[in-house]
Amino acid sequence: MKFALLVTGGPFQSKSCHSALSFAKAIIAHPDHELIGVFFYEDAVLVANQLSNPPRDEMNITHSWQQLAQTSGVELKVCIAAAIRRGILNEAEATRHEQAHHNLASGFTLEGLGTLIELEQQADRLVRFRP
């Protein structure tokens, strides 16, 4: 079965990003399941900010998602409109918006809502993690 995940709860306001990460790991570990992509929307886009630094005694959720993407090849897609609204920019968007720096964490890509629709069409199940 093919799964896609939609994460909408912010990494600091709820456990949505953490729960989605656990679910993603379970999908990947199951031989009959495939995780075709993860789409971060609304406040969940904050997980893609490479400048966030949680306290040392807390899990760094950004690094955890990056490790998952590296080891599994799962694509981490971030809503471009929600990200820009929250100050998360890749190099191209930083230039376009005349900002000196970009802060999109490696392993994440900025995508439009059309990408979410494509994921939904390709997946057998779209699972949403919200606050």
Image: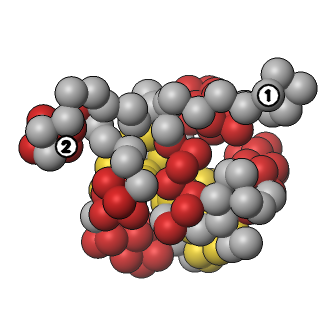
Badge 2 is on which residue? 93
At 49% from the left edge and 38% from the top edge, which residue is drawn? Answer: 49
Mark 1 or 2: the one toward you = 1
Q: Amino acid at mark 1?
A: Pro
Above or below — where is 23 with respect to 98?
Answer: below
Which quadrant of the figure has residue 10? bottom right
Residue 18's spot in the image, x, y percent? 77, 51
Which quadrant of the figure has residue 126? bottom right
Along the viewing direction, whichever of 33 and 43 lies nearer the viewer: 43
Q: Name the N-terminal-most of marks 1 and 2.
A: 1
The residue lying furthest to the right in this view is: 57
Element carrying mark 2: helix
Q: Amino acid at mark 2?
A: Glu
Along the viewing direction, whichever of 11 and 64 lies nearer the viewer: 11
Is residue 72 visible from the viewing direction of this image?
A: no
Along the viewing direction, whichever of 69 and 80 lies nearer the viewer: 80
Element carrying mark 1: loop
Position of 102 with respect to 47 (left or right) is left
Which quadrant of the figure has residue 80? bottom left
Residue 50's spot in the image, x, y percent? 50, 30
- Colour scheme of the rendered structure: secondary structure
The residue lying furthest to the top in this view is: 56
Q: How many marks?
A: 2
Residue 75's spot in the image, x, y percent? 47, 45
Badge 1 is on which residue? 55
Crowding at mark 1 (Cα within 10 Å: few <14, some 14-19, many 20+):
few
At 33% from the left edge and 71% from the top edge, which residue is drawn? Answer: 113
At 32% from the left edge and 54% from the top edge, which residue is drawn? Answer: 84
